[in-house]
Image (cartoon, coloured by chain):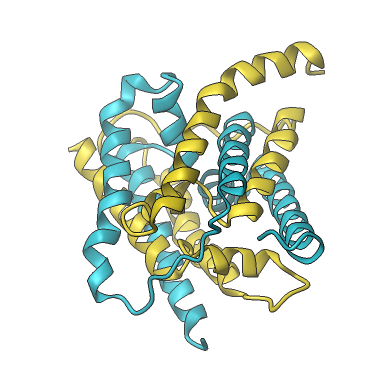
Chain colours: A cyan, B yellow
Amino acid sequence: MEQDWIWGLIGGMLIGLGGAVYLLANGRIMGASGIIGGLIDRSGWDTAAERLAFLAGVFLLPIIVYPFYRSVETHVTSNIWVLVAAGLLVGIGTRIANGCTSGHGVCGISRLSLRGMVATMFYIGAGGVAVVFFRHFLGVV
Amino acid sequence: MRNLFAFIAGGLFGTGLFISGMTDTSKVQGWLDVFGDWDPTLAFVMGGAILPMAVAWQITRLRRTPLMGGAFPPPPPVRLDRNLAIGSVMFGFGWGLAGLCPGPSIASLSYGGIGHWVFFAAMLGGMLVAPHLRIRLDRLVPAQ
């Protein structure tokens, strides 16, 4: 679809705007893995309310926008082992690296953080290897 | 008020992920798949998100404190360490396998179906064991 990149750009700017609000109003870095992870391993329970409010927004707004939107398919694999392995890797990896696409990628790169840029190179590289290997060699995803 | 701003930020984040197509796993995998039918969307999402965020970081230099009080985050550490590399490679591998990362996995829970819940549950499980693995990793190969 030709307009996909326009929606990508608009959506991306909303993502950045969300990060800007979280930073300028609450003084926090909008990193999805850190916000969830701090609730899961209890390291962020002192700021639990704020974290839950943020996650509620992430979860609920798509429900409100959903009826007005053009395409909503997700194409996730039905292979349960791939889903479990991928989920575990994402959960463990983001917590060990202290960030994911939003924290290291969006918030880190935009402040020219070396760690954010290096992390982003590593996870994009690994993601590329995973897709190419599992799609073109094994045909699993 | 803090919670209201957090909810607004999360709402913008969720809406952005949703309309940009980042909750569609085939768009993420399509961007990572350089040998397939390459989908450039993710680059536009990243670029679009970094712009307002870069402006926000500049504003933190002019203002002393956030709107709701407290302090802005300290400057990022410069030191690169082993955990950053190991964790990011693990994360990237999982991201490529499923086409989901933490933000979009939550934004798509309401309509993505059972597969998204399976991924989400496994991700939370991973986050639960991560601190223990991290301690073991540090014992195995002491940093520096």
Q: Is residue A100 left or right of residue B109?
A: right
Quarter of the image where one finds residue B68? top left
* Residue A31 seen: no
Q: Quadrant of the N terminus of chain B?
A: top left
Q: Position of residue B142 (x, y in %)?
A: 80, 14
Q: Position of residue B6 (x, y in %)?
A: 28, 42
* Residue B108 seen: yes
Q: Is residue B124 left or right of residue A98?
A: left
Q: Is residue A97 left or right of residue A136?
A: left
- Return the residue found at the far top: B139
Determine whether B60 is above or below A35 in the image: below
Q: Position of residue B69 (x, y in %)?
A: 28, 31
Q: Which residue is located at x 48 percent, y 61 percent?
A: B49
Determine whether A60 is above or below B136 in the image: below
Observer-nearest residue: B86 or B124?
B124
Q: How many marks?
A: 0
Q: Which residue is located at x 47 percent, y 73 percent?
A: A9
Q: Which residue is located at x 25 percent, y 51 percent?
A: B8
Q: Position of residue B77 (x, y in %)?
A: 64, 31
Quarter of the image where one finds residue B47? bottom right
